[in-house]
Amino acid sequence: MTGFPILSVLLAVPAVAAVLCLFVGAQGARWTALLATLVNLALGAWLWTQFQHGDGAPQWQFVEHVTLFKMGGAEFSWALGIDGFAFLLIELSLFLMPICIGASWLSVTKRVPEYMAAFLATEVLMIGTFAAQDLFLFYVFFEGGLIPMYLIIGIWGGVNRIYASYKFFLYTLLGSLLMLIAMIAMVLNTGTTSIPVLMAHDFPANWQTWLWLAFFASFAVKMPMWPVHTWLPDAHVQAPTAGSVILAGVLLKLGGYGFLRFSLPMFPVASVQFMWVVFALSCVAVVYTSLVALVQSDMKKLIAYSSVAHMAIVTMGLFAFNANGIDGAMMVMLGHGVVSGALFLCVGIIYDRLHTREIDRYGGLAINMPRYAVLFLLFTMASIGLPGTSNFVGEFFSLAGVYQVSTWTALIGTTGIILGAAYMLYLFRRVVWGDLTKDDVKAMPDLDGREVAMLVALAAVVLWMGVYPTSFTAPMRADVARLTQRLDSAAHTLSISDSKPTPGSPQAAPTHEASAHEGAH
Amino acid sequence: MSSILIIVFLPLLAAAVAGLVNKSFGAALPKIVTTGSLFVACGLSWPIFLSYLSGSAAPTVTPVLHWMTSGTMSFAWELRVDALTAVMLVVVTSVSALVHLYSWGYMSEEPDQPRFFAYLSLFTFAMLMLVTANNLVQMFFGWEGVGLASYLLIGFWFRKPSANAAAIKAFVVNRVGDLGFMLGIFGVFLVFGTVDIPTILAAAPNHAGSTIGFLGHRFDTITVLCLLLFVGAMGKSAQLGLHTWLPDAMEGPTPVSALIHAATMVTAGVFMVCRMSPLFEQSAVAMHVVMVIGAATCFFAATVGTTQTDIKRVIAYSTCSQLGYMFFAAGVGAYGAAMFHLFTHAFFKALLFLGAGSVIHAMHHEQDMRYYGGLWKKIPLTYTAMMAGTLAITGVGIPALFGNPVAFGFAGFHSKDAIIEAAFASGNTGVFWVGVVVALLTSFYSWRVVFLTFHGKPRWAASEHIQHAVHDAHGHGHDDHAHAHAAHGHDDHHAHDHGDGTAGYHPHESPLVMLIPLILLSIGAVAAGFVFHGFFIEPSAGETYWHGALAFNEHLMHAMHEVPVWVKLSATVAMLLGLGTAIFAYIVSPGFPAAFAEQVRPLYLFLLNKWYFDELYNLLFVRPAFAIGRLFWKRGDEQTIDRFGPNGAARLVQFGSFGAVKLQSGYLYTYAFVMLIGLTAALTWVIAR
């Protein structure tokens, strides 16, 4: 498709603004960043109207291709283009960025120009990751995303920021290196760096196993999956509010996106082979991290652990290999992006007032911050997955998809809705309910206009996604169908083997009324 | 515009307006908006119900908006109206409208009224979405929506720790049920390929005899689906095992208890089983489980109800027990009788709760019946209303025997006796006897409430609330939520005892806005059974009315009329025995209960402590969850994963660099030595390969 290079423009706007930020002083940098992200959001709205879906829509849209250099048969090119998955995640990033800038408006006072530049750089790298169609271009964006986040935590973070940022970096580095090696091997094997071509390429089964494992090392950490999740609570606790928002909102989605873009379509046979590993790790994560979340006394840590549990629902859904599961996984990613972003923002708002994340230092906020209480309640309920909010749609489809593959996994995954209710309501009770006894808490003012605007925008999207999720599932429907079709052939070849779980489908015998025996046999 | 759209969405609109406007224009506007919209909804609901009664209406489905599509699963927001929905519409809107009105009086001293009314209307909206659902997911939406409203209203007095705890408990225990409901929906989709209720019910017979894999074993398909859905129903309807939240839910304001925790929300489980009855009919095992759980709950709750001293808790356990009746009616296949009891119960139980609220209001928020007594002269209208409710729940009436052509009695007489007779007629003798025994217990605990509250001598002086009221000379509002206050020394209280047990306190009858709902509900409690029993349970009229909206078992309804005379009399006899016992224990010989409790102390404590369910669950689930969470966090994350993961790697790097530092010593001979080793190694490799 020729025409307006919207994707490059989406990358250029924050990139230029980031450079500009460094030269205009603190207040100037704030306005520059806000303006740039808002321009990008407007472009995103335009993109929303232009993105085609339905019958006859091309898989890859807004394609751009410029060869940068060639190396043997392979080339390194500026290749951009998006399908439904990438489109939705780009929209999520575009939506969250202005809110991040808004959240940092007053709370960041140290090195403001550099801070804003780092955020804009993050936006560039995130959009680039989702839009890249060249394997190495993807790698550059994907790993590059680490650097500004590393700096945001390391420079503007809390007391223990050095440990947190180093842990964050160490974890992700190991996976990345393995992924790079795998990418080189793929290019040597196929002679192409084009992601769309690779997605249709059938690697030999033994190759798939090793490549899958290498990619898994990277994506599992990014996700994060148990047991490589321990960087996340520390990173969140130490990161500034906006850093947490973008970390939970978008960076955690890179792992899921990686599975969707690479592991599932490129290595379908290996994916089916390792389904049980993913299911087992996800099951452990749901129960384990939910219980850990229950006993946290630090608000950010609690929400960080809950993120791990939610992401486990994503990995379960993805590896159910059916349309429900994949739809659900994407919807959890989008919903969690908005909701956990909002929850971190809620934490940040009261942190700005009292400068502590200790849950027990609060209590009774419903009395002096009623507007805050209402919005916090909405996001709490969304996080719990109440129907009518974004997260329900995702959890419901994801677990419905899993049920069709493994009832055990679905059962354990669904316990997440009980545990999720327990830890979130326990948090809500300790922060918002109760009597207002502490003097410094009494002095906390309710939300101001800036805060209301940010939270209401998030709330509107949460409800939109819950009441009319078709807006979000329609753009990716064709992509989900393509993916499941590709997975079906692989799943089919392996379903004969014993490793395939007992299918939960009935052996329908409608005419055998006489043999209507009850119970097990 | 279809009237059902107005009925369902007007309360939502009202809730939004009340919530957003809040106190900006005083409390009056939100109150008028919410109450007004509920009366409109109620006014529109009755004609729908009447049109079904007259047999002139056919089921309709009103589309609202597409909801979700994923793969082959697709469903919409749509509103279904049929005979079953029509019953629920009138129950929900009528009780809700009256409770709104009642709250004008009951909550008048509450500073946060707009929030309260917004929650009430929000609840009504969610409940209406539940009963009009045409697919299981929308039913689940309503299911969770009422759960949210219930959570918010139980925790309405959010400063009270006990209210907070009760709210969380209600939500989390319900979520355990929801786990079953959700898995049930997944299973239904897997089997039927749709979540559309009419399609499922039509296809249900095709799946008889099929099996399904569940948790590694294979079971009968329909049995698995029904039992999973029933777990959801057990949570919402507080059935044995998942009932523990309901008594605690009494922390909420009394109008809430009447609307949500008696008349409407808790009956959602019964409604769901009736809605899905053609599916349940396909599984004898599932039906049996429903029956047994219902009977067990019925018995359990009634036994506990006999020992509680908090007036609201007695009525709460009574609700739990009556829900058990409804379930075992459904379990024996008498869905019409289950819905009938749901219908009459809504009126008389709402009446009992609102009556109790009126008593509590008069007694300055004292809820302990031990500090009541002799109130009938002071609040005669409330007394009359409570009498009507008690006559209804205990099932007072004259059976159609010994030449009497028409059975005539209060509401519960028609519906509860129908359930007991249906149990016998279906051949489940054991459950029949449970029904009879519980009828005795019901009569006993219900009359116990009346006698302790309204008869005997006043025992008010010992109440802290009353002392508080007398001390403050009625001069203060609810600023610190009078119920929450801590102990006031007992000793000085008795100084003010006027010798007649009243402590000089003068209870007042409630204002008119509270009495009107009581009067209207009294009419329902008296007449609802006699007027409507034909449509709900009579063989031919019932078939015409239900018209396939539930699995109406005409054969069973016939058999119900053919039961022996002693069966027909049994419930009435049990009721009279219960009444007699209550008269003896609380009027004739008031010292007897205490003496008797002392004699059977272990049993008494067992019942008083509600069979120790809370203690057991605390021990089994709550405390372990926290302990394991702490273990995973400290031992798992910090001492294992971090220790051997990133921190271990860091130590390794440190160690490695320490070694590297040693190597770079600066001495030429070490470098030469290393070079030599390298050269040797390289040569060896070249030669040996």
Image (cartoon, coloured by chain):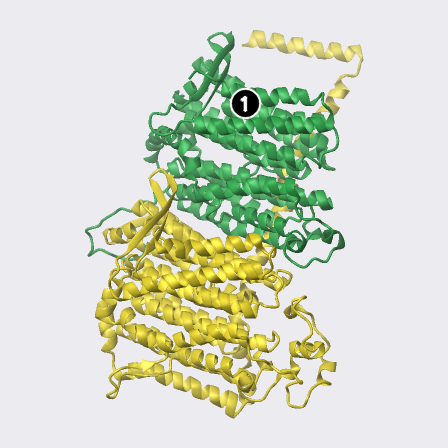
Chain colours: A green, B yellow
Q: Nearer the viewer, residue B75 or B34?
A: B34
Horizontal side, residue B434 vs residue A233: left or right: left
Q: Is residue A509 visible?
A: yes
Horizontal side, residue B78 vs residue A99: left or right: left
Q: Nearer the viewer, residue A203 or B148?
A: B148
Q: Which chain does tag 1 point to?
A: A
- Name the residue carrying label 1: A10
Q: Nearer the viewer, residue B446 or B473?
A: B473
- Residue A127, horizontal then vertical, whole percent: 54, 25
User: Does residue A19 sit above or below A224 in this rendering?
Assistant: above
Dot 1: few (<14), some (14–19), or many (≥20) neighbours within 10 Å?
Answer: many
Quarter-of-image position of residue B398: bottom left
Quarter-of-image position of residue B266: bottom left
User: Does residue A338 sit above or below B312 in this rendering?
Assistant: above
Residue lying farthest to the bottom in this orientation: B588
Q: Nearer the viewer, residue B57 or A312?
A: B57
Q: Residue at x 31, y 52 (%)?
A: B61
Q: Is residue B630 visible?
A: no
Q: Residue at x 31, y 47 (%)?
A: B191
- Residue B348, horizontal then vertical, whole percent: 42, 74
- Residue A59, horizontal then vertical, whole percent: 39, 24
Q: Hey, what amino acid is under mark 1?
A: Leu
Q: Residue at x 44, y 78 (%)?
A: B389
- Residue A49, horizontal then vertical, whole percent: 44, 28
Q: Residue at x 47, y 25 (%)?
A: A210
At numbered mark 1, what does the secondary structure look like: helix, strand or loop? helix
Image quadrant holding the C terminus of chain B, namely: top right
Instruction: Count the numbered circles shown.
Output: 1
